[in-house]
Image (cartoon, rainbow, N blue to C red):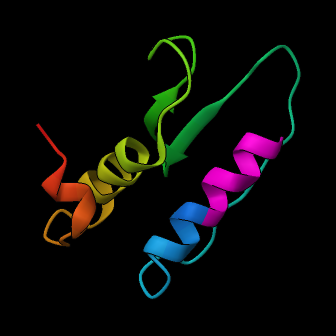
Amino acid sequence: MLRASWMAQELLHTFSTDIACVTLIPGTGGIFAITVGDELVWERKRDDGFPDAAELKRRVRDVCFPEKPLGHVDKHEG
């Protein structure tokens, strides 16, 4: 839950004027999934672990706000 709340904080900070809400749903068994609407952005088992903050921000941006630059996050891409 600590990692999930930290990721939620990162998303809210980065997309503060663009994103309506972030919802954390507790689970058991190592579940860690991030969805935007019905689209699965990250899933711990599928994507082999947890994302770093920059990768998560890129994936959310690519789904929600593809035109939005992410500044220093984009500079480290590639």
Q: Residue 77, relative to residue 13: is it above or below?
A: above
Say whether residue 5 is left or right of residue 42: right
8 w.r.t. 31: above or below: below
Check the image and report above or below for 40 versus 73.
above
* Residue occupying the point 45% across, 88% down: 17
Residue 50 percent across, percent down from the top left: 55, 27
Left or right, 78 with reference to 37: left
Q: Is residue 12 left or right of residue 75?
A: right
* Magenta residue span: 1-9
Q: Where in the figure is residue 73, as x and y percent of width and height?
A: 27, 57
Residue 5 x/y as whole percent? 75, 53
Of 16 and 53, the residue lying toward us: 53
Q: Is residue 53 above or below residue 48?
A: below
Q: Residue furthest bottom?
A: 17
The quadrant in which residue 72 appears is bottom left
Lateral position of residue 52 relative to residue 7, left or right: left
Location of the N terminus (image quadrant): top right
In reply to whether residue 8 is colored magenta, the answer given is: yes
Residue, x 19% and y 48% (percent of image)?
76
Location of the C terminus (image quadrant): top left
For the point 47% across and 48% down, which residue is it? 53
Q: Position of residue 64 (x, y in %)?
A: 32, 62
Query: Residue at left 36%, top 42%?
Result: 55
Judge by depth and name the residue closer to the eye, 8 or 39: 8
Tell me the chief SS of the magenta region.
Answer: helix
